[in-house]
Amino acid sequence: MPRKTLIVLISFVIHSTFITGASAQTLKTRWASKVSSTTPLPEYPRPQLERTQWLNLNGSWQYAILPKSQESAPASYAGNILVPYAVESALSGVQKTVGKDSILWYKRSFTVPANFKNKNILLHFGAVDWQTDVYINGKHAGTHQGGYDPFSFDISSLLKKSGVQEIVVKVWDPSDEGPQPRGKQIIKPHGIWYTPVTGIWQTVWLEPVAPTYIASLKPVPDIDKQSLQLAVNTEHLQPGDQVKITALDGAQQVAEQTLDNASAATLNIAKAKLWSPSSPSLYKLKVSILRKGKIIDEVKSYFAMRKISMAPDQQGTQRMLLNNNFVFQFGPLDQGWWPDGLYTAPTDEALRFDIEKTKELGFNMIRKHVKVEPARWYYYADSLGILVWQDMPSGDLGNRWDNRPGIYGRATDKDRTPESEKIYRSEWKAIMDAVNFFPSIVVWVPFNEAWGQFKTDEITKWTMEYDPSRLVNSASGGNFHPVGHIIDLHNYPDPAMPEAKIFGAKQVLVLGEYGGLGLPLDGHTWQQKDNWGYQSFKNADELFKVYNGFCDRLKDLIQHGLSAAVYTQTTDVEMEVNGLMTYDREIIKVPAEKISAANKGVINSK
């Protein structure tokens, strides 16, 4: 972390006003009024693996917050909560903080649709923060740890033969008082730290499947060989079963292969249409399990043909390449927070809105900052055409920065406990497994600014080996190690870059954060006073003059080897007013056409 950035951070932390998350939430988005009280977020939640039958369990559940010492389910509940909005959010209808000493309980009933008969029933959770136990009709279905990855349980054996079924969900989340990944959540929000998110925050749903079914797909394109490697993960495949894979461009079949008891196929995609932000071409996939010629299970999916790589330019400086060409990657730091839903966008339209506006503003990339989004967000990134850098949510913070002369952006690797290390490794793998399907993701970011950073070389090398199809940015913003594909500097407010002579021969040079130009707008802020930005302005004209000057500076840095830049940030978030949009998404602070022209000027300057 640059020394002047550290000074700015210390200043706002000391002088910020501490608030409770619930008391601050009066700001709403336009989509809050469109939230259904019976079935919020009704859209199919898993577009990368789609079946026709499913049952959405979002809606009104009962809830109770009880002391952690009370392990058994409550005899009575405190009231109703709207799932899947976190209990601290306004949209949940509860808006209460839970904390490490309490347990959040949920309860609801449902009936199994008649057309699910003779199928195995999977209960899916898009995400629950953090430790979850699920009970069906009083029997334990399973336990899950992790606040950002989807999980499911086969509840077939726990269901009654007919009639009303009962789900009880038990959640414990220590927020910033535990070692688990939690991103920007903190019990006492201030500065760059926001309201906690506890419990269910993505869609809950039921899915009927055959005893033998397709569990996941992992497509890996190779544009140089004009082929697609497709891994098909199945459950309970029997001898003699076949897996049939069909690739289509619209309605036209472009490849087909049938596997006999195999889990991976290589499809030839001749004259492939390459995916890019300017041309986000997607192919369709249909995958079936056949038994004696009969379809046992079938899913719809998609893939893209694109390549992310690096290679030296004529000056010997490593450049980040998209489809074998240098494309300067320029986008905002995207926190993915909402004033009414916190981690959860009020509606699917709202979820899509931020990506649409990012494209409208002339960017071609988003850095998804210490948060993981629902699958539909990545589907929109794929279909609309935006490159994504995916952060691992931070946790177990507390590294010590080394500011001795001659030390460049270094901090000590944190000495984490065995439990903390295990949690990190498990959740990072689970997150990668959950979202590696999506072609828009081109960079993995295991650590941010030494926030809980540990065993950097080992974690980075593991990430590179686990997914060699993408680039790895080991430590965005500091604690630099000679490992990973990317060296990433944070500098506020003006643009800067890592030293090309020191790093450029082996690593891609990027500016992982800069900007933070603040402009509070009355009636559109989370709180009435004590709002802040890294640099504050009184009007949009003043802000844009500086923003445009930063764009001119980026053009110069590109000539000296810079491959990407990330501007802070997409929207205001709680106390921060350094967004290009207000937190409620009502106002783009500078006319979109002016920002777009400046941004496209940067991207096209090379």
Image (spheres, helix red, strand yellow):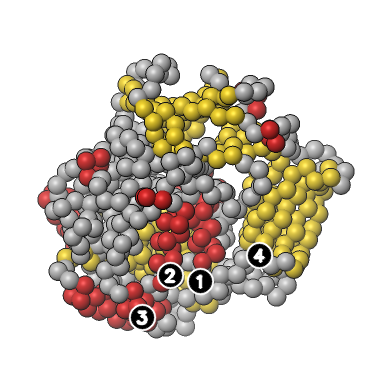
Closer to the chain start, of discs 2 and 1, is 1
Mark identifier at residue 440: none
**Residue type (three-letter) at the residue carrying disc 2:** Lys
**Residue type (three-letter) at the residue carrying disc 3:** Ala
Q: Element at badge 1?
A: loop
Residue where numbered disc 3 is placed: 597
Closer to the chain start, of discs 1 and 3, is 1
Query: How many marks on residues?
Result: 4
Spatial CA distance of label 4 from label 1 is 15 Å
Percent position (x, y) of residue 226? 69, 70
Spatial CA distance of label 2 from label 4 is 21 Å
Percent position (x, y) of residue 403? 21, 56
> Residue 358: which quarter of the image?
bottom left
Spatial CA distance of label 2 from label 3 is 12 Å
Split into 4 quadrants, where in the image is the N terminus?
Answer: bottom left
Judge the density around disc 3: few (<14), some (14-19), many (≥20) Cα neighbours within 10 Å. few
Judge the density around disc 2: few (<14), some (14-19), many (≥20) Cα neighbours within 10 Å. many
Residue where numbered disc 4 is placed: 283
